[in-house]
Image (cartoon, helix red, strand yellow):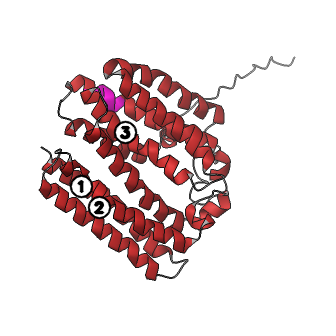
Amino acid sequence: MIPNQSRATTRTSISPVQALRGLGDLLALAKPRLSGMVVSTTAAGIWLAPEQPSAARAAATLVCTGMVVGAANVLNNYLERDVDGLMRRTWGRPLPAGRVEPATALALGIGLPIFAIPVLALAANPLTALLALVALVSYAFVYTPMKRWTTAALFVGAIPGAIPPLMGWTAATGSIDARGLALFAILFVWQLPHFLAISIYLKEDYARGGLKVFALVHGERTAKAWAVGTSALLVPVGMLPAFLGMATWGYGAFAALLGGALTLAAATGLRRPDGESRWARNFFLSTLLYLVAVFIALFLGAR
């Protein structure tokens, strides 16, 4: 007599380590370092505004802004997953590496702003929520596809990147004025040399992905010349808060010096041979230092 054999039921269990890795991959889709930097510019807009919102309104504005920015980055990852899989810098990201399903990323990218934008309208005001929507749509659905076919994406992409400090301003004041637009202008112009530097030192990777960045389409020397010109534009634009009475003239002088130093750093690239990525990376880092320094000076020199 053969004894009855019991049927074993196999259950797929996820270990805590696997769960943490999964959450980490979802977080990586939102590009937390980039999102954190963007949210900090929103905080700057709140801080520099003449009227200060309540702590609860300010916190809600920052949290919801972070959610919208994170969603824009998630949608960017979703829409560019094929391109990311071709480039060395990005092929290890969660989507091209197969660690996150595209449908999951899409649901996250849509779900976050569906929650965050209405809350932003209630916690801050409808104008700030509208700016968040413009930033999300222009980044994910205009700038992201444009990179595949025109270098004009450089200028279009600078718009959503410059909106967050204006959102901080409108969350505090409820309106757009010249002072809020000055913060927008600083971030808009700053992004131009910043991303021109990236297009130079990562041009081979962008070529693999088929993206139409400035250094590939117009040549490295032209990209360097544009980096010089746009850096020089930061001299008058960086001084706008002083002209508008937002900051002292001490800040204005320092901002002019920073813009001049960045312009000189850009100009040294014209003497470098094409294909030398070290200068471009160093200039890229210089643009980051500029942004940090100019905002610290703005905080210290605010009126």
Q: In the image, what residue type sits under mark 2?
A: Val
Residue 16: tell me if it is visible: no
Look at 48% across and 40% down and name the residue there.
30
Sequence-wise first label, 3 or 1? 3
Give the x, y percent position of residue 199: 53, 63
Number of the front mark, 3 or 1 = 1
Pointer 2 local density, CA inside 10 Å: few below 14, some 14–19, many at least 20: many
Q: Are marks 3 and 1 in contact (CB under 8 Å)?
A: no
Outermost residue on the right side: it is: 1
Stretch of the chain drawn in magenta: 58-63
Q: Are marks 2 and 1 in contact (CB under 8 Å)?
A: yes
Judged by its main secondary structure, the magenta piece is helix
Q: Quadrant of the C terminus?
A: top left
Q: Along the line of sight, which residue is nearer the eye, 131 or 201?
A: 131
Which residue is tagged 3? 164
Q: In the image, what residue type sits under mark 1?
A: Met
Which residue is tagged 1? 239
Q: In the image, what residue type sits under mark 3?
A: Pro
Q: Quadrant of residue 274?
A: bottom right
- How far, Cα to Cα, is label 2 from label 1? 7 Å
Seen in the picture, residue 122 relative to 193 is either above or below; the reply is above
Q: Quadrant of residue 8?
A: top right
Give the label on residue 235, or none: 2
Residue 62 is covered by the magenta coloring: yes
Pointer 1 local density, CA inside 10 Å: few below 14, some 14–19, many at least 20: many
